[in-house]
Image (tube, rainbow, N blue to C red):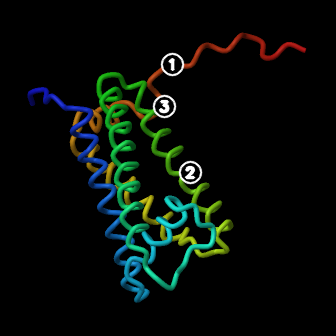
Amino acid sequence: MPHQQHSNFREGLVAGLIGGLVVAAWYLAVDMGRGEMLYTPNVLGQVFMQGDSIPSTRTITSGAVIQYSILHFGWFFLFGVGLTALTHLATRNPTFRMGVWLFLVIGSVFWFGISFMLYTLTDQRFPWVTALIGTLLGVGSMGFYLWRAHPTLRGSMRHLPLGAEVKSPPHPPGGPQA
């Protein structure tokens, strides 16, 4: 199979768009199920963009929804470009595969922490469980897209398990000295 040239920026934007759309669809489905259309982006917009620690849950503020949507896709585009750059490094050098994994885990845990902090700050109005599940779906969809787009990376995982890229240094004979 011929080597395919990948653009970090273009591919990162596509990955970010996929992740952002998956999360937006998740928010929409949850909000429709609750009978409160646009509740989640409304609360997130009021908290993030307007600094409101007690967001209004009775009325939808269109400005908050629009501002949050811009922030939402902006962050996903940045995350997508970063993840794509690491994926391209890992495709060329297997030692960077752990970096891709750490980027995914640290990014997700960071958002989980922010979500829980906002949940307590907003007197439990912030939909943190919805945001956590959305984050997992979004990051998972981005990872799946990049996994499918890079068969070389998939092949390297079959031949060399994650973490086995570098040989361990030999241990000194005799064990630890007292």
Separation of disc 1 and disc 2 at Cα? 29 Å
Q: Which amino acid, by three-letter code, is at mark 3?
A: Gly
Q: Which amino acid, by three-letter code, is at mark 1?
A: Lys
Neighbourhood count class around disc 2 (C-alpha, 10 Å): few under 14, some 14–19, many 20 upward: some
Q: Is residue 168 above or below residue 53?
A: above
The residue depicted at 28 percent of the width and 47 percent of the height is 15
Q: Residue 108: x percent and y percent?
A: 50, 51
Q: Residue 67 appears in which quarter of the rendering?
A: bottom left
Q: Which residue is mark 1?
A: 167
Viewer-closest of 109 and 165: 109
Q: Residue furthest right?
A: 178
Viewer-closest of 122 and 147: 122
Q: Residue 56 appears in which quarter of the rendering?
A: bottom right
Q: Which residue is mark 2?
A: 109
Q: Is residue 35 left or right of residue 145?
A: right
The residue depicted at 21 percent of the width and 42 percent of the height is 149
Q: Which amino acid, by three-letter code, is at mark 2?
A: Val
